[in-house]
Image: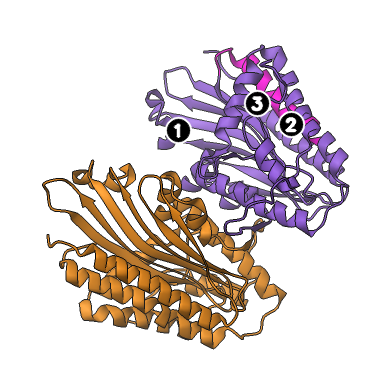
Chain colours: A orange, B purple
Amino acid sequence: MSVPDTSAVKAFLLDLQQRICEGLEQLDGKGTFEADSWKREEGGGGTSRVLTNGKVFEQAGVNFSHVTGAAMPASATANRSELEGRSFEAMGVSLVIHPKNPFLPTTHANVRFFIAKKEGADPVWWFGGGFDLTPYYPFEEDVIEWHQNAHDLCQPFGESVYPKYKKWCDEYFFLPHRNETRGVGGLFFDDLNQDGFEKSFEFMQAVGNGFLTSYAPIVERRKDTEYGEKEREFQLYRRGRYVEFNLVYDRGTLFGLQTGGRTESILMSMPPLVRWQYAYTPEENSAEALLYTDFLKPKDWLNLDE
Amino acid sequence: MSVPDTSAVKAFLLDLQQRICEGLEQLDGKGTFEADSWKREEGGGGTSRVLTNGKVFEQAGVNFSHVTGAAMPASATANRSELEGRSFEAMGVSLVIHPKNPFLPTTHANVRFFIAKKEGADPVWWFGGGFDLTPYYPFEEDVIEWHQNAHDLCQPFGESVYPKYKKWCDEYFFLPHRNETRGVGGLFFDDLNQDGFEKSFEFMQAVGNGFLTSYAPIVERRKDTEYGEKEREFQLYRRGRYVEFNLVYDRGTLFGLQTGGRTESILMSMPPLVRWQYAYTPEENSAEALLYTDFLKPKDWLNLDE
């Protein structure tokens, strides 16, 4: 295994956090990010940057963290017993954005780098990450554009990259108890190291950089769409699904909560306001029903299989 | 093991659901319960009764279910391998009440009966249940009265019963990632069978019947307390903890969601409206701060240890 250049990854991540926050502030036009730096007892720490009550964004959180530990957490070695007992180093940027306007989709992105180390042995490292979109009132052209952007950034790394990570994303962001995907997906990858450090790092950078260039045009295009109480209520209701997914299924969230991560940074992903309504079903043929029937299932948005 | 009278348990549970719903309607004075009956593919079903937008209760859900299955779920036999492969029958009433007024506590109660069966062997059965209180602006006298009622209903079953189940409740309804109890507790018991069917069933009935007689006086006393936006906002914020507990830790919720239970009945426990706020901390010495410092930790409310 090639030796990873950890400091280059860290520099990229810090710069990415900065660029994304600047880009979001520009899109918002009013809100600004506040930063909290924190330390972790076992080693390392991070900086959480949060924008609340913006003009466009009800809440946007962009986390950077770089943590170290003396022993790999059990949950991380369940399927990789060869890594048991190794020390580890993990760094990443992760973000969740909850816009105000129900015609703007919620979105999540994450890029991360993990190294498991042992005295006298080569370090084992890998990259992971991705981004995905959770619309309430989706525009089909936006979803196609989102996937086209994801596709295009994957192309230099091989024909099979987009289909593989698009499928992984659909499978990961799925709520079995609702039989729905969390949204319309995007990319999800993990355990990436097979092409060597340089190539893997390049791909992670492409995903990290590709997030805002894919999300910003959708925000620009839809942020002034008029909406009323009905749309707001539906958005708040659907945000409940986001909570359900993150608290019941999301490995990153559960891992963080169960290993003494900084709770406020982990739960920055929670929407600022959420509604649950017993036995709600959308009216037939309504815009709300369309979300369920046409969007919340895995779809070949780019017609690649034809 | 004595042979359990399943039909007597079922009759009690159905009657309990009915009496609790009637009692809550009376307390509310406006809202009424609507009922949904449902069937479960693997066997059995239930009736969910929900009151929404009452005068006092923003939402109250009272579930009855009676389900059967050909094989004990893996999660139920993890610590009891002797029950693996047995068929099972489970019945219970569970309820969650979210009042409107922030001076009224949210509450939860549950009583349940479980039997694991095998051809040619005695059935293995047990009772479980309890009730607990989650105030936002607690009145100490209400909390003491709540625990006094819990204590008194336990007394006929032995001196050690209340302390044991009070402690279990504090331990079960705990959020490690917040280092807070969910509320001020009450009773929690499980695996109850050691005193034989009659005695165990009697205790379960005492808990089931004791719930409303303990909760109703608090509602009567506090339901007209005046409140403003500040108290409402704090209530919505604290409801987030309820969501966090139920979705991350509650065994019943996770078991239900992961074994194809009826999602809407399980998630009836979710509050109708919830807020999250990044890095919120209450003002020092405020009424809100008092909740954290004086109530959200295990306490000997009845001074039994003195």
* Span colored in magenta: B193-216
Q: Earlier in the sequence, mark 2 or mark 1?
A: 1
Q: Earlier in the sequence, mark 1 or mark 3?
A: 3
Visible residue check, residue A187: no
Calculate the distance from the C-alpha at mark 2 to the C-alpha at mark 3.
17 Å
Crowd band around label 2 with a 10 angstrom C-alpha radius: few (<14), some (14–19), many (20+): many
Q: Is residue B211 magenta?
A: yes
**What x and y, as percent, mark residue A178?**
51, 58
**What x and y, as percent, mark residue B51?**
76, 50
Crowd band around label 3 with a 10 angstrom C-alpha radius: few (<14), some (14–19), many (20+): some
Residue assigned mark 2: B211
Residue drawn at x 48%, y 26% is: B116
Q: Is residue A122 left or right of residue B101?
A: left
Q: Are marks 2 and 3 on the same chain?
A: yes
Protein chain holding label 3: B
Q: Earlier in the sequence, mark 2 or mark 3?
A: 3
Calculate the distance from the C-alpha at mark 1 to the C-alpha at mark 3.
21 Å
Calculate the distance from the C-alpha at mark 2 to the C-alpha at mark 1.
26 Å
Residue assigned mark 1: B76
Residue drawn at x 59%, y 33% is: B91
Q: Give amino acid for label 1.
A: Ala
Residue assigned mark 3: B9
